Image: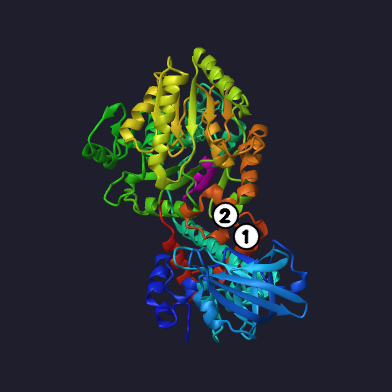
Amino acid sequence: MITLDTSLTAFPSIKSPMLARLKRLHIETVGDLLYHFPTRYEDYSEILAISNAIPDEKATFEGIVLSIETKKTWRKGMLVTEALLGDATGQLKLIWFNQKHIAATLKEDASIRVSGKVVLDKGVFCISSPAFEFSSRSAIHTGRLVPIYPETDGLTSKYLRWQIESILNRPIEFTDLIPQDILSRLHLPSLTQALRSIHSPRTENDRLVARKRFAFDEMFLIQIKALQIKMQWDVETAIAFPSATEKVQAFVSKLPFELTAAQQKALQEIARDLEKPSPMNRLLNGDVGSGKTIIAALAALSVASADYQVVILAPTEVLAKQHFESLFTLFRNEPFETALFTQAYQRIGAESVNRETLLQSIQSGIARIIIATHAILQKNIRFHNLSLVIIDEQHRFGVAQRAYLQQEAAKLSDGLDNAIPHFLTMTATPIPRTLALSFFGNLDLSLLDEMPKDRKTIITRIATSDADRRYVYQFIQREIDKGRQAFVILPFVESSAALTEVKAAVAEHKRLSEEIFPQLRIGLLHGKLKSKEKEAVMAEFKNKKLDILVATSVVEVGIDIPNASVMLIEDADRFGLSQLHQFRGRVGRGEQQSYCFLFPGENASASNERLQVMVECSNGFDLAEKDLRLRGPGALFGTRQSGIPDIAMENIANVKLIQIARDEATTLLAQDPKLEKHPLLQKTLARFDEKIHLE
Ligand code: ADP
Ligand code: MG
């Protein structure tokens, strides 16, 4: 019996060099192979009469081999096989180069199907290197929707098609992880049927139904996972804090600004959660610059004032340091200590301390608010009444990583026997509400969809010509003369080419310093700098010792420099809308008018749709919706990072599908909360968990 777990070594037709290549793609079992889905299909389903052939179009024909001949070319010694195919309506020439086996297998009078692109050569229809198979064989490579697989070295689509087909042609019946009643209710095909249809669809509809089935599977798993997390969460206890409204309000009244209505509402929602004896699990979903940090700070204040401990997790050392600086300043008159814990820095208030001292003060509770990187998620670190964990997720963690972070944080030795911490997560960029509601199903939501009122809309322009460039540089000069500062962001290069990226940054820094702005102070920030070096550059920029900061996009720019008023982005078309918005959000943080200049790369047009959208739209939530539509959700969350399968990614904006998946997941878990009656589902979920990892 073949199951999805059957090893591919059980198939003599798969030879060991191929097994090794498949293994490199993590394909080792029947299940791995069958879940290696085609990326697209060539439509060779219709068999055309030869007389209906259209030059430059791909098609399939069926006929008799009228003649076949193999010759060696005179000059290059190449083997050329030429055949003439005839049907009732006409003749077609077929040509193959250096394919000895064609001459050996294909003989005169054979009846065959061929697929490929037709060209008209000296008045004769002709296909060069067509796929062919004998008419007596079932259609694999021709005569149907032919699946095309993501190809890698030495594993062609043809090979994969052949192997997959030979498995699917056996009398297989895989155990289905989705209960039959759900499949019937939703009119979804069985797993076996869906696998057959996705690899070998008879019709376009077959293919769509199969995709729908797999999309449902993934979404169903995600929803079960979310609901399980929520269920675990709901039975946990947390410290219930008495209302700290007065303390917090007194503090707020001393801030140099007034909270926006959205901030006040979020603050109330958080306060109400903290008053309950069950752990908060809330997502603070806000636009860039909407003021998430102060909300986190106020939540921390109310907990710290009650003598309980708070950890704030930042994704990078630079951001941790920055949060520390601002919170330490904010709380300098409070009767508790704010601390910083990263690989490179350990501080208690104004004092740098060694790791041992810091750990002791964390354990004793002297350090009350601790800003840290993930380095703090260690079992051997002892906390003292840790009861609030805030995650600042500039890195756009997927839902899975957040769950992981939370699990790890909940496991921390917090000094509280029967309680776990409350959790607050802040998004890096705004997440469209529909998406957040469906995809972050285990979280409660607070929305910061309003900007502080003194904020001016950032003026955004696309600059294309050399004259534009000169103008922008003059403009930057004038802003700097007024005492402002500017960012220059360089394009993203795949991380494998990190060195190229650094080189480009160094070169641009040199060019700007020597040719364009010799009189200005220009700093450089890139991914290869050490934490301390980055920190030093950041500090210089923050303290106005630098006029311009040249930075690559790998460098975390969730930084707050209120005096910066110009953001120049090179090769802007290479970034997604959310990213561009995130960069743009680095300026416009103070009261002065700010500007963002987008330079499209050499091969992009000025009418680049995304850049145009940036000019017209300044609302992060709207931009995120548009990004979703233009590039799909993978771009918003980072598919690879989150470990969420592609097919689910394509569907995370499909609210209807998500609703259905969620309803079915709720019903199933109500009947079988531990999935004891659904062992396969349980196993698949466990595997789903494994795929999920941090960065
Ligand atoms: P983000 O939501 O992107 O993390 P921050 O929390 O860094 O934004 O806030 C951006 C800037 O706006 C900070 O300098 C902060 O002090 C300031 N800020 C926050 N709330 C308000 C407000 N209600 N009015 C004016 N400025 C505010
Ligand atoms: Mg922030």
Determine the residue located farthest toward the top in the rendered image: 481
Residue 454 in sight here:
no
Residues rendered magenta in the picture? 270-284
Q: Label 1 amino acid?
A: Ile
The residue sitting at 67% across, 59% down in the picture is: 656
Q: Where's residue 426, x and y in %?
A: 50, 42
- The disc placed on residue 658 is 1
Q: Is residue 116 left or right of residue 323?
A: right
Residue placed most toward the observer, 261 or 213: 213
Gap between marks 1 and 2 measured at Cα: 8 Å
Q: Residues within 10 Å of mark 1 (few under 14, many from 20)?
A: many
Q: Label 2 amino acid?
A: Phe
Q: Which residue is mark 2?
A: 439
Report if residue 272 lies within the magenta region.
Answer: yes
The residue sitting at 64% across, 35% down in the picture is: 606
- Compared with 610, 208 (above or below) is below
Compare marks 1 and 2 and give the one earlier in the sequence.
2
Check disc 1 and report its element: helix, strand or loop: helix
- Compared with 573, 546 (above or below) is above
